[in-house]
Image: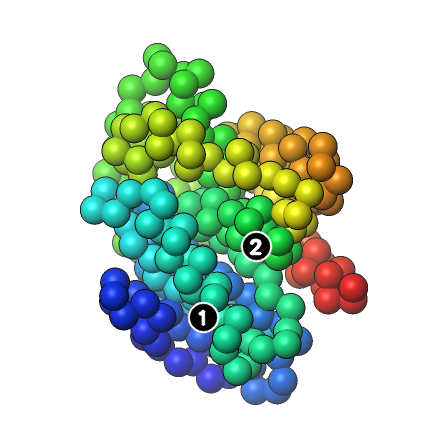
Amino acid sequence: MKITQDIIYDSGNDLKLDTYAPDTKPKATLLLIHGGGWFRGDKEKESFLAEKFVNEGFFVVTPNYRLAPADLYPSALTDVFNAYAWTKKNTLAANMPIFALGASAGGNLAVELALQKGIPTASWSGIIDMYDWVTQHPEVKAVMNKEQHFDAHESREIDQDGNNDQFYKWFILNYVRNDLNLLKSATPLTRVSSKSGPIFLANSLHELVPISGVLKLQQALADVDVPSDVKLISGTVHGEGYWELALPQTLAFFSSYLAN
């Protein structure tokens, strides 16, 4: 495996990405997007999962993106789309299928790639139910959870404590600086179309991210004849914390689109 770090893909914003290349010709490319509530996180946290996919024959790209509250929606989304454009032009990625995977906020951004770019995507605990959830929970006070270990090196060690509505509301509103009109625009459910790509959705039943987003997105995709797979996991574990359960089904999902 060859790892190349800190490649600048957006010089204007000094945004960098890492690539992980297998020793043999890759069968596909994976854009692997870190989480962290859109306000923390870094591409290096994805090294563990990147290596898992490299071992399965993927060329993996892990980008950084701008974070809130310094940069609000759609800055992070714009950056991920720019990283996708860079990936399509990369020599190793040329003429190969491109997939996306993200967890938590990264899952939200990965879903947007499926919805707007039409590529097969996997989302683990992706943040999907945003505007509706916030407006339907006026009684919930938005509170930052300072005890979460967002700066831990590995994403699979983050946010494993179950549901936390106050914190969920806080980082969603932080992404848009409490602007509900902007939050409506940021909600990916508004961009489902017949041209959207297929999506694999995983979520724990009692975790930080409510399963309502998974159920709403699957229904919206079905309404426009776009296929999806859903894996609902017992317990409270969030995102990459359940990687051992979600990875085999994610690989099978991607493989089904390699054959097409």
| SS state under label 1 | helix
- Residue that numbered label 1 is attached to: 86
Residue 62, horizontal then vertical, whole percent: 43, 66
Residue 205 is at least partly visible in this image: no
Rendering colour mode: rainbow
Disc 1 to disc 2, C-alpha distance: 14 Å
Q: Residues within 10 Å of mark 1 (few under 14, many from 20)?
A: some
Q: Is residue 78 left or right of residue 72?
A: right
Residue 169, horizontal then vertical, whole percent: 35, 28
- Residue that numbered label 2 is attached to: 117
Q: Is residue 216 left or right of residue 258?
A: left
Q: Residue at x 42, y 37 (%)?
A: 186
Residue 172 is at least partly visible in this image: yes
Q: Is residue 130 left or right of residue 124?
A: left
The amino acid type found where label 1 is placed reads Trp
Q: Nearer the viewer, residue 95 or 172?
A: 95
Residue 115 versus residue 34 in the image, above or below: above
Q: Residue at x 54, y 34 (%)?
A: 189
Q: Residue at x 55, y 58 (%)?
A: 100
The amino acid type found where label 2 is placed reads Lys
Q: Which mark is residue 256?
A: none
